[in-house]
Amino acid sequence: MFRKIVNIIPKDFHPRALVVAITVLLRAILNFFGIAMLVPLLMLILDFEALQANPIVTEVYNLLGCKSHSQFVIISAVAIVCFIALKNATNLWLYNFERNFTYDLYGHLSRKLYIDYYHRGLLYVADHNSTELSRNVNFVCLNFVIGILKPSMAIVGEIIPFALIIIAIIFYDPTASILLALTFVPAVWIYYSFVKERLHRYGQQENQAQREKFRNVAESFRGYVDVEISNAFPQIISAFDNATDRLVTLRKRDATLSTIPQGITETSLAAGMAALIIVGAFMPERKIGLVFGLFAVAAVRLLPSIRNILTSLTAIRYNLHTIDTLSEIKSQSHSVEDTQQRIHLRKQMEIRNISFRYSENASNVLNDFSLTIKQGARVGIRGVSGAGKSTLMNIMLGLYTPCKGEILIDGVKLDHSTRRMWQNNIGYVPQNVFLLDSTLIENIALGVDSDQIDYDRVMEVVEMASLKEFVERLPDGLNSHIGEAGCRVSGGERQRIGIARALYKRPDILFFDEATSSLDRTTEQSINSSIAELSAQNSTITIVAIAHRESSLEYCDQIINIERL
Ligand code: ADP
């Protein structure tokens, strides 16, 4: 497990992790001295004679020029209080390193996991539940830091002074240490072996229940109309209730298990005291007071320590599943490519003998497919549903890598190194244009910072996509809010926004993926004539459209049919 945690922490955080480890150690040692300082104080009161026998103490006593026992006690007590106050202030300062490290690491891991998922590509994203991916990015990373890292450091920070205290007591008075060990160790051991496996299981089950809850909520809002018309809400709410019930039960169990350490430690303390009284009956009177005092001081410090260790172990067992999720992060570069360079299409795009299948065991969706698209051509690709049109489109967009064959743009091979530059030169309109929950202008200039948006270009593309009337009707024109929580747009308007977006970046080539298939005939014709018009006015722009019906491709001058294999 330790190896896995170290592997999750990125290399550039390792030096900081080392500094944090040192500060945790320093804090632990300081904490030990904090408690150790109480022993001489105790002896000052209970066994001054024994203390006086110590040559160092006599030296200090003489150095301070103390005239009486009480003067020495007062000076020592003030010095001890000052030391403890200073120790706590230092500890607070040292804690900053741990706090900054853990939360900075959370930010870093969350970003890294997000970019990692994104870079896994369309095939991965399409195959996974988006709510689950976003939950991992936002919550699992936080749970790892709070539920694994912080408790691990807490355990180290507690165990060191704990061990030192026990060792010191063994040296000073074995009776008290044996009693402490006998009362606490078996209780802690029994508790931990009882909860260990349970907690791991509860953690995994909670993760599963959380996932289901998130999915139910997201799906019911995303598919509201379908859910409502199909009367699927009762079924969804029952699945939601089921997950909530499981979650509530797990949380209750976890809460119960977390309160047990307090009971265990207190009972152990009482048992230790009782044992001490019994053993004390056989000790000289002076000695029993000191042993009792030592036991009490140690127990007062050890009690919360043991509780903290147990609670931390509980948290770690409960959050073990986060390690698996984060271990999946690939160690490739997590930088975001942001080049503005383009690969231009001046002559032709060649699709050469392309084959594609979705997985090793699946059969080919495309087999040895070739096509040459000249600059300025309007190519329509037609085929029945399932023929592989969208697959071909995603290959042309650089989103899927073909299993065989290649795509050349003016002789430049489309691969992972040229993909971004090719995409910078592409306009793409899908069947359901994705709208950002933002203003219309930000939706048109998608990916451009609001203060960098070229307003004149936006007005141009609004005109080209025949959106002018729509913009004039909006309450705040281009600054009106559209998207998920914004004002409603019709199917036709949505597609026109998609066209305006595609045109904004002045692409050499426009891809339409069933862009008008879900529209009524009149709207489709109107959009088709807008496309035909903009294509006539920009003769160098290349158009590739895929559709299952001929009417969606009326502006094309070359139609390719693809068959289902
Ligand atoms: P079209 O766009 O012509 O309707 P697609 O390219 O979407 O066809 O799909 C072609 C075939 O590939 C279909 O049999 C479909 O089930 C399969 N397919 C599409 N996407 C995936 C995917 N992500 N994983 C596995 N199979 C897929």
Image (cartoon, rainbow, N blue to C red):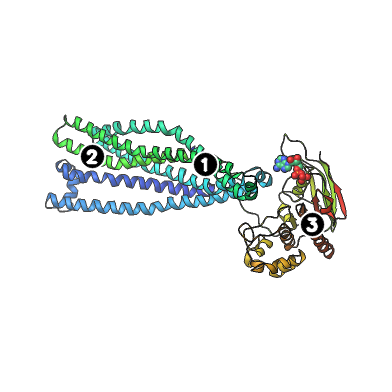
In the rendered image, the residue lying farthest to the right is: 557
CB of mark 2 within 8 Å of CB of mark 3? no
Mark 2, residues whose alpha carbon is within 10 Å: few (<14), some, or many (≥20)? many
Q: CA distance from mark 1 to mark 3?
A: 44 Å
The percent position of residue 374, horizontal first and vertical second, equals 85, 55
- The tag earlier along the polypeptide, 1 or 2, is 1
**Which secondary structure lies at badge 1?**
helix
Q: Inspect the image, locate mark 2, and give the three-letter code of the amino acid beneath it.
A: Leu
Residue 280 occupies which quadrant of the picture? top left
Please name the residue that numbered disc 2 is placed on: 294
* Image: 8 above or below 521: above
Give the residue pinned by disc 3.
Answer: 524
Residue occupied by mark 1: 241
Write down which quadrant ligand 1 falls in.
top right
Q: Amino acid at mark 3?
A: Glu
| Mark found first going from the N terminus, 2 or 3 | 2
Tag 1 near tag 2, CB within 8 Å: no
Q: Position of residue 95 (x, y in %)?
A: 39, 51
